Image: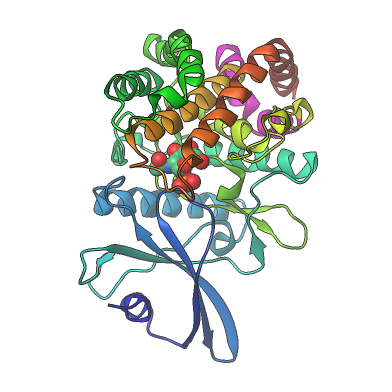
Amino acid sequence: MDKINIVRQFYEGGEIKSIVPFGSGHINDTYRVTIEENGETHNYVLQRMNTNVFPDPEMLTNNATKATHFIRKKLRARGEDPEHGTIRFYPAKNGKYFIYDDKGLCWRFENLIDHTVCYDLATSPEMFEATGVAFGQFMADLADFPADQLGEVIPNFHHTGIRFETFRKAVEENLSGRKNTCEKEIAFALEREELAWSLVKKLQSGEIPVRVTHNDTKINNILMDEKTNLPVCIIDLDTIMPGAAAYDFGDSIRFGASNAAEDEKDLSKVFMRLDLFEAYARGYLRTVGKKLSEAEARSLALGAIVITYETGIRFLGDYLNGDTYFKTAYPEHNLVRARTQLKLVEDMEAKKSEMLAIVEKYWKEAQEN
Ligand code: GN1
Ligand code: MG
């Protein structure tokens, strides 16, 4: 079945003008579909889901449609436009939100909100602060979402302790035979086992609460208005699951407060910008700070280090396994990604007291308002 026929399973109207690769995801294959209808041109997203990573598309689409439905109600209550603030998935002719084609590949189709763009890096502190507001609002909107309605699409997704064990196994097995090319990085990662368990322990002891979280809060998972560069809509709801605020906050910092791309080869360019950290923390804590305990607020700074470490050992583990999980554009891609993450961990460790002071400042400010 070609892509036009696949689109037609979901959408019958108009004339399909183009279907082109879109976005920078590491897991699914994403295409932008342009359709001309009644003299207007609209864009849509066609996605081939990676069923090795997401083996249960039914659960996946269930989670995403339930969460968007819930958020739409919140937007309506605030007088905001629900069609603008959330993605809408289209049911296929089979009545489900996904189809399998004749090759057994799994597809879904959704709208792409007009006049929006995605960024891989924050272009200004103002933009990043607004991103903090958007993800803060997202968590606040889902605060009363019944977590038991969400399937765990990828079990233990941000259980960094289990991620560490998986990484240690990848080192031991050395399936790719590449271990000798990354001894320094492996040693750096193995030395930090304690970090892997730090947030997990806080969750297990109840020091910080379990919340419904996005779990992939990269800045490129927000559609920005093409004119104002301000957030319009949070996308990629594939990993909405119970989790911790610290992981979501931290993942935004890992990706968006870095001075360079996730796969920058020149490590001298890779460090965390404190001005961007502060901008995000301000936006986020001014939005949800009042709902967080002091311990939870303090865990946000640790969250940035832990999720960066987790992402680093996932990339390095995949490199050692022979690149079976993340898409790569060249043989060392996962190693290059792992190096940026571990460099960021080192840099954040050095800046930890400043990060803590910033979150405390905005958390306290939020309690007074
Ligand atoms: C993957 O495909 P993408 O870019 O949305 C990964 C995230 C990682 C991210 C690293 C399901 O997300 O967990 O943080 O790459 N998603 C999954 O950039 O594993
Ligand atoms: Mg994702």
Residue at 76% in and 25% down: 274
Quadrant of the image for the C terminus? top right
Could you tell me residue 232's position as x and y percent?
A: 64, 55
Residue at 75% in and 21% down: 365
Quadrant of the image for the N terminus? bottom left
How many numbered marks appear? 0
Could you tell me residue 59's position as x and y percent?
A: 27, 48
Residue 178 visible somewhere in the drawing:
yes
Q: Nearer the viewer, residue 175 or 225?
A: 175
Colour mode? rainbow
Q: Quadrant of residue 144?
A: top left
Horizontally, residue 216 falls left or right of residue 291, namely left
Could you tell me residue 278's position as x and y percent?
A: 75, 27
277 relative to 206, above or below: below
Residue at 40% in and 49% down: 27
Residue 240 visible somewhere in the drawing:
no
Give the magenta-colored segment's residue range: 279-299
Residue at 30% in and 37% down: 152
Q: Quadrant of residue 209?
A: top left
Q: Give the prevailing secondary structure in the magenta stretch.
A: helix
214 relative to 297, above or below: below
Could you tell me residue 83's position as x and y percent?
A: 54, 64
Q: Quick check: is 345 in the magenta stretch? A: no
Q: Quick check: is 282 in the magenta stretch? A: yes
195 relative to 150, above or below: above
